[in-house]
Amino acid sequence: MIRNRRNVCVLLLVATSAVLLPGSRAGSEARPPAAQAEVKIDNFSFSPAELTVAAGTTVKWTNRDDIPHTVVSDDKSTFKSKALDTDDTFSFTFAKPGTYGYFCSIHPKMTAKVVVQ
Amino acid sequence: MNRKTKDELMVDHNHDGIDRRGFLKCMAWAGTGTLCVMQGGILKSFALSDASSLTGAPPAGELCFAQISDSHMGFNKPANTDVVSTLKAAVDKINALPKRPEFLLHTGDISHLSKPEEFDTVDQILKSAVAKDVFFVPGEHDVIGDDGKQFLDRYGKASQGQGWYSFDKKGVHFVGLINVMNLKAGGLGTLGAEQLAWLEKDVERLAASTPIVLFAHIPLWSVYPEWGWGTEDSAQALALVKRFGSVTVLNGHIHQTMQKVEGSVTFHTAASTAFPQPEPGKADSPGPMKVPAEQLRQLLGITDVNFVRGQHALAIVDSKLG
């Protein structure tokens, strides 16, 4: 009976740790769900101006400004949104690590970056 | 004969004997309906209500045109929920000018989101202007998503490269420049090498006495770089027209009137017909500026430009919509 209980305890422990650590990275037993992050566009700026995320994260930009903006990678090809009017959104999933500078192609002084680790 | 040390000082470039103090006083009034005119080398100022005293009998070789800018057709936020009405008011103003303009210049941001119906609406409204010819240059809002293809299809038939062109009216040489394409992260407006090379060729055969008018969307001078209010390579363009006795630069983009004189070059930006924007540095960002409804039309406007042969500079008059 004691053995069974210990086994049960061990089982419970493993199950618990799997439940409690859903966001852990490499080396964990459970697969973490894809992470999400948000960037707000307002007052001619992206915030946060520098966002750090894990590879595989989907970043969603929401335009809260009263003027349209775009989200375009510095190389103008990696990602490129259409014009986002107020409350429009754009999402991009960053599969590969790296630093991705981007800007608004309508108002190029608006710059920011996503750092993917 | 004083050599300029700052941009703001008036240079006695042509030994006109300009009274600097009078000139600076005049500049302070610019945008409130004051006409500053060079007559026989003397700078005089007239309230807009007195402008009719200048119209009299038009001397031969006189040219009159109007500039409008930043109609942002499609914009519908609190700063102005009815940009159609204010554009129509601008056309009414044009049609009521004491001297009928021969044509219009639209210095860009015709549309708000580069949508076909937005361009269509502006075209429709401008049909009721007394001046039937309209010359356009695009703003950054007119070339969204398609590198300006739609703009060029509509308005750039006679243009070269990415949309630049020139034409002559009564001996005045007009050049439409494009500085809203190929914008780079963190950058300002840009003309680019190809356009500058074209400009050099375009003006090289002209006599130095030919009055030149350059028009482009983003200011061709450094109004406020922090807000993108400037053009990276405008100095190169201005060097190409340095030898001319009269150069007028007409821009939009900043949604307020501003004027600067540097030697023989007069820089002027027009008000928007859609919504005002804050003065440089007076707000966090250069977005649409909300004002009480009854004040809106006072911050929107058109520009009337008169060229009189024999006069040194073009007479530029800004009129408010309300």
Image (cartoon, rainbow, N blue to C red):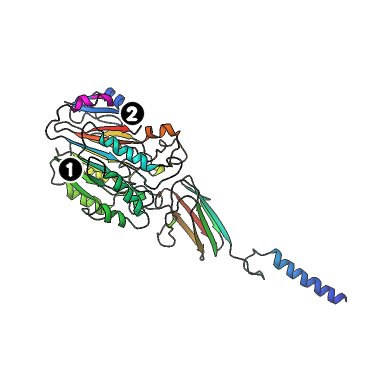
Q: Is residue B175 above or below residue A95?
A: above
Give the Cα distance between marks 1 and 2.
28 Å
Expressed as whole percent of the image width and height from the top left, the position of residue B104 reads 24, 42
Q: Which residues are magenta?
A: B44-62
Quadrant of res B222: top left
Which mark identifies residue B205? none
10 Å crowding of disc 2: few (<14), some (14-19), many (20+)? some
Quadrant of res B207: top left
Task: State left or right for residue A19 relative to residue A96.
Answer: right
Q: How many marks?
A: 2
Quadrant of the drawing holding the C terminus of chain B: top left
Q: Chain of mark 1?
A: B
Which mark identifies residue B173? 1
Please indicate, yes or no, whether residue B162 appears anywhere in the rendered image.
no
Which residue carries the number 2 mark?
B32
Expressed as whole percent of the image width and height from the top left, the position of residue A82 reads 42, 57
Give the residue at x 66% y 70%. Answer: A30
Expressed as whole percent of the image width and height from the top left, the position of residue B137 reads 28, 48
Q: Nearer the viewer, residue B120 or B233?
A: B120
Task: Give the amino acid type for the residue marked by disc 1 in the picture.
Answer: His
Same chain shared by disc 1 and disc 2: yes
Disc with the residue nearer the chain's start (1 vs 2): 2
Task: Give the amino acid type for the residue marked by disc 2 in the picture.
Answer: Thr
Q: Secondary structure at mark 1?
A: strand
